[in-house]
Image (cartoon, rainbow, N blue to C red):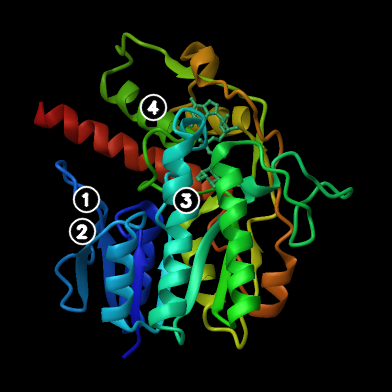
Amino acid sequence: MNKALILGVTGQDGSYLSELLLDKGYIVDGLMRRSSVPTCYRLYNVISNPNFKIIEGDVSDTASIFRIIDDGQYDEVYNLAAMSHVGSSFFQPYAVAYIDYLGELNVLEAIRKYSPPNRHYFAGTSESFGSSINKDGFQNELTPFLPNSPYAVCKVAAEMMVRVYRESYGLWACYGILFNHESPRRGENFLTRKVTRYIGRLIASDFQLPEKLQLGNLNSFRDWGHAQDFVRAMWMMLQQDKPIDYVVGTNKTHSVKEFVERAFQYGGGLDYKEYIEINPEFIRPLEVPFLCADSSRIRLELGWKPEITFDELVDEMVSHDIKVALKEKDYN
Ligand code: G4F
């Protein structure tokens, strides 16, 4: 049986990846930070699986990462642990550096010292491209990185460190340059979920919500896919003969405004303009204006492609959040 370690198991991607690996017959250990509030709520499908185990540790704590990787002797190590909110990274640049950059260095160094046969995946990001776009309007593996936030700078540094460890020490390590990926398990302060949660509450309140939805920049463009499709790409990347870094995305882009418009329409033909307010608090000091993947390499070489469309994603998130809000209303 293959044995995998997932750092960042309590997040959206960690929960879907756990389900995928357990379905494939893996033994899965998930790293969890100690917290005074419950953080396992996304793991409802796996928590009682006998092949799944939670281990306490922190990616930014060198001692715990060294010990866990030495003790575990895993076949595959996935580092998805991150402070992943781009806007917050402007307010907490040191925290991002410790978690997103030095955290990955801890993992690479642990594998090099204690478990060199591990295959390792690092969660890179399309934020690394920042303002950089190919002449054809897409971003692919050849597009230069030009990060626009503390988050993206730390991710680029970690991505480059993966390459350095691979080329210097022969580690089997790669990173995915993943474009935005969402789901009903997305954190509520990311754009998509913030919108669908509001729509759910609006409908559950019979349109009596006192506050409008406060948003920032509506004019940026994102390539939004479904997290379930994207964790499949992570796993596929670790099954190839040699470690290669791939761009993963849907190859289609939509503006924030289009997402908001579509979500409100799905929530009963609503006109979003009546319910939103622009609040400068949510406008970032520096924005990534346009992201659109050219993921032809992973499609050609590994046969990956997304199965869930943009419309299906929006519809799934809106219907989920309407149900959640109606349940909350009954409970109260
Ligand atoms: O949902 P977002 O916060 O995601 P963002 O910044 O694109 O980053 C996500 O995707 C990256 C991959 O490309 C990941 F690396 C990263 O960890 C994260 O998962 O914002 C999407 C867009 C931005 O342009 C933002 O400025 O929506 C805009 N936006 C407008 N109003 C807002 C809001 N974003 C948030 N979070 N909240 C708003 O009120």
Query: For the residue with label 3, is its CB less than 8 Å from the closest atom of ligand 1?
Result: no
Q: Are marks 1 and 3 in contact (CB under 8 Å)?
A: no
Is label 3 in a helix, a strand or a loop?
helix
Q: Which residue is mark 2?
A: 44
Question: Which mark is in front, 3 or 4?
Answer: 3
Q: CA distance from mark 2 to mark 1?
A: 6 Å
Question: Which mark is in front, 2 or 3?
Answer: 3
Q: CA distance from mark 4 to mark 1?
A: 22 Å
* Mark closest to the chain's N terminus, 3 or 4: 3
**Residue beneath the point at 78% across and 52% down:** 144
- The quadrant of the rendered image in which ligand 1 is seen is top right
Q: Which residue is mark 3?
A: 100
Callout 3, which amino acid?
Asp
Q: Which residue is mark 4?
A: 199
* Mark closest to the chain's N terminus, 2 or 4: 2
Query: 288 left or right of 331?
Result: right
Callout 1, which amino acid?
Tyr
Q: Which residue is mark 1?
A: 41
* Mark closest to the chain's N terminus, 4 or 1: 1
**Residue beneath the point at 63% across and 69% down:** 164
| Neighbourhood count class around disc 3 (C-alpha, 10 Å): few under 14, some 14–19, many 20 upward | many
Question: Which mark is in front, 2 or 4?
Answer: 2
Rendered location of residue 315, percent (x, y): 46, 43
Residue at the extreme top: 210
Is label 1 in a helix, a strand or a loop?
helix
Rendered location of residue 253, percent (x, y): 68, 44
Query: 93 left or right of 224?
Result: left
Eyeballing the image, is 7 above or below 131?
Answer: below
| Neighbourhood count class around disc 1 (C-alpha, 10 Å): few under 14, some 14–19, many 20 upward | few
* Mark closest to the chain's N terminus, 2 or 3: 2
Q: Is residue 140 visible?
A: yes
| Neighbourhood count class around disc 4 (C-alpha, 10 Å): few under 14, some 14–19, many 20 upward | many
